Amino acid sequence: MSDEKKFRWVGTRPIRPDGVDKVTGRAQYGADFALPDMLWGRVLRSPHAHARILSIETGAAAALEGVHAVMTGQDLPDLFAEKAAAAGGHDDSNNLAHNVMARDKALYHGHAVAAVAATSREIAERALELIDVEYEVLPHVLDIHAALAPGAPLVHPDRVAQGIENSGPSNIAKRLQIGHGDPEEGFAEADEIIEREFSTRPVHQGYIEPHACLAQTTQDGRVTLWSSSQGHFMVRDYTAKLLDIDLSLVRVIPAEIGGGFGGKTTVYLEPIAVSLSRKSGRSVKMVMSREEVFRASGPTLGTRIKIKVGVTREGVLTAGEATLHYEGGAFGGSSVGAGCMTIFAPYAFPHVRSTGYDIMVNKPKGAAYRAPGAPMAAFALETVMDELAQRLEIDPVDFRLRNAAKEGTLASFGPRYRRIGCVETLEAVRDHPHYSAPLGPNQGRGVALGFWFNAGLQSSAGVNLNPDGTVTVLSGNPDIGGSRASLAIMTAEELGIEYEHVDVMVADTHAVGYTDVTGGSRVTFATGMAIIEAVRDVMGQLCQRAAAVWEVDAERVSWHEGEARLDGGFEPAPLGLAELAKNAGKTGGPISARAALTARGVGMGFGAHICDVEVDPETGRIDVIRYTAVQDAGRAIHPSYVEGQMQGGAVQGIGWALNEEYVFDDEGRVQNPGFLDYRIPVASDVPMIDTVIVEVPNPAHPYGVRGVGEVPIVPPIPAVVNAVHAATGIRFCDLPLSPARVLARLDEARSPGSA
Amino acid sequence: MKRHISTTIDGEALEFLSEDGQTLLDALRDVLLKTGTKEGCGTGDCGACSVMLDGRLVCSCLVLAAEVEGASVETVEGLAEAGELHPLQKRFLEGAALQCGVCTPGFLVAAKALLEINPDPSEKEVRYWLAGNLCRCTGYDKIIRSVLDAAADMRGETE
């Protein structure tokens, strides 16, 4: 496809098909469903960070008027224990099953230990108070240092580290190493070497909609679930697996999703709701409180990263080496692998090595969070890049451009890059007026680059042509940020019809083929490919119908601008979509198509952000006063929603840099499980977020699409931190940059005797 | 004990039975099945449950259902006239001011309350007025722009 090709719909900004429902309150999210026989399910959660469960007495709760079912971990099948034992304790299904409800041990403050279903929420709450759990409180470990200390309490005493030969039980779930070349050789060639250590605290995805579902079960074993998630096939598959049910008996109907950012790519409530429904014979609704969301879902946890980067006097990178420790929570499974793979990814490093450790601690089981693992890695690398540029007296964007990855560069995670837009993105930053705008007192500017892989995975789609020439598209991906619009745009573009004549439905697990989660920035890319394939099938059928009408070979008919045209020869009037659709019954039956694929040729994404801050020397408060996000989108199908991803990711990253952190007390209890004390950015905290969409089309996608959702959270942390350095001369290596911490460093720098 | 409550919601006179301690939000959602008003936190921190109570912007999770006896409640569900969206709703759609959309009902109700007392707010005034409404998807940019655009529409300064 030529870059000059003019599109009718691609690149325009029509109103999303689900828009009116979402501004009128009609759209149904996870907690908005109800059934006449419905009970309310509630979960009892561990008050301890680490405790053996000696006994659970549920008799009094079950006897309470209005209570219809009580359950504990003993009511869930233990299907995976043998497999887990054979794998050194690391079977993911076993971890998931034990996270949904504790069996012999509670592993974090908030771990589910029992649940009830009752005729009202209030009765269910009262019943929870009547459940008597006898705990033996165990010593806990809360962070990486404590988890690795000699003699540390073990979260799982039966587990041995994967990737470390002959190791005994420890809190290391896994070790991995990647890289190429010989870093020692590279550092020997360097004129400047900087080595630093960075840390980040646990943060939550912070979606506004708490987890929620409604479960209905029947006597013959069928299950229907209404559930808000990033993938209803994921909900179906995990729920069926944990409860040992055939997939064909489980139908999951996707609710609208009120934000996920990776945190709704797993199940918490659904297996419990189904179990309570089976026990009670009634449908069961469950909705987490905000406190439960903080204590028992998400988060992404703490990290420590040690990084060393070497560079020549001319500003050419010679080597990078990093050791990354990521907390994975109570079961391991952190994003340290992606951290290792992304930390050096934006640049051409001749020698590079990353070693990662996945650490188990008594905190909630970590979940994916938008470009999982990458923002912390970028914090480390991009802060050091800033310092190297400063030391070499090179402009920080020029320094990055000298080393930027391009087509053919050997990526630090293995392959050679195909066509990518890293250089174009940095050039757009360099050329942006923001980059050279003047700054006032106590102000500073920082830049940072970020990378994310993006995902392909499996997608299915259906396209039905209606008798009036309108089109219904079936997608298997919950629409988390406007994807119905981008899918409708591509459908209308292909068919050459009005955008308003296309409607997109997120179809349930019985109505559309298997589709992986709305994650990895994949929907417009991968599910878009499936839809385009199905639309092209429909166009082929339309040409065949026209050929039959004209009594010519189908090869002579092609589809242009919404109509079938005969190539060469005599010239019948073209047959439009509406006419072919109306007569479909007479020319061979309804016209529809399905497509199912594993999307190949994912377009890797780069973004670079410019951040201006003003630091209040009296209070340590940091205000972001101007911000520009630049990103290669490949091709922006609906630019408003691409910009929205960039703006939202930037602000989420600003929150991570400046405010957000879990606070635990000495007993390992979460002290701030609410939006008052876990403060995400509000409207008055941030400025407008300017955006520049760079378009370096992905050759593997019909319209050149790259994923756009995750990249925007990768650069903000180092962009903010580099800006604070520019404003204050102080380099921060530990998040968040809350006023108290900043003020302490400012006071230290101002104190007599300091340099 | 259940109380009998007579109230007006989105212009319609309604009666319902309220449990002791039940919030207005729970009464709206669970008793009256008006689920357009959302719960994000239940503690008054996120603004997703914003409604107007006798002309005052409140978090319905912090109001007891019994308090609306004889009062008038306006929710997002009453924002559109029959067949016609409110200018804020139109601008939110045109400006892509929502991604997941779960915070949108609260933002719309809160923004409408602002424009009733201040038809020509500055960007800063909009940002501070809406500081009690959390959005995690948009970074607020398109929300703020859409409110400013709708304000201009309502002042008759745009087409």
Image: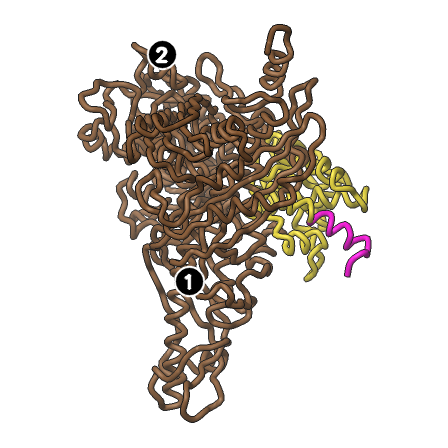
Q: Is the magenta stretch mostly helix, strand or loop?
A: helix
Identity, as a three-letter code, of the amino acid under mark 1: Pro
| Residue A101 picture location, percent across and down | 35, 29
Can residue A34 be seen by looking at this rendering? no
Q: What element carries label 2?
A: loop
Residue assigned mark 1: A702
Q: Check disc 2: other Cα within 10 Å, few if <14, some if 14-19, many if 20+.
A: some
Image: A697 above or below B30: below
Q: What span is colored magenta in the figure?
A: B146-159
Q: In which quarter of the image is residue A77?
A: top left
Among the chains pictured, the one given yellow colouring is B
Q: Is A87 displayed left or right of A532 in the figure?
A: left
Chain that the image shows in brown: A
Find residue A139 and name its label: 2
What chain is tagged by disc 2?
A: A
Which residue is at a point 53% across and 38% down the rendered structure image? A397
Task: Of the two numbered discs 2 and 1 on the same chain, state the one appearing first in sequence.
Answer: 2
Q: Residue at x 68, y 62 (%)?
A: B83
In terms of depth relative to the viewer, which is nearer, A266 or A554?
Answer: A554
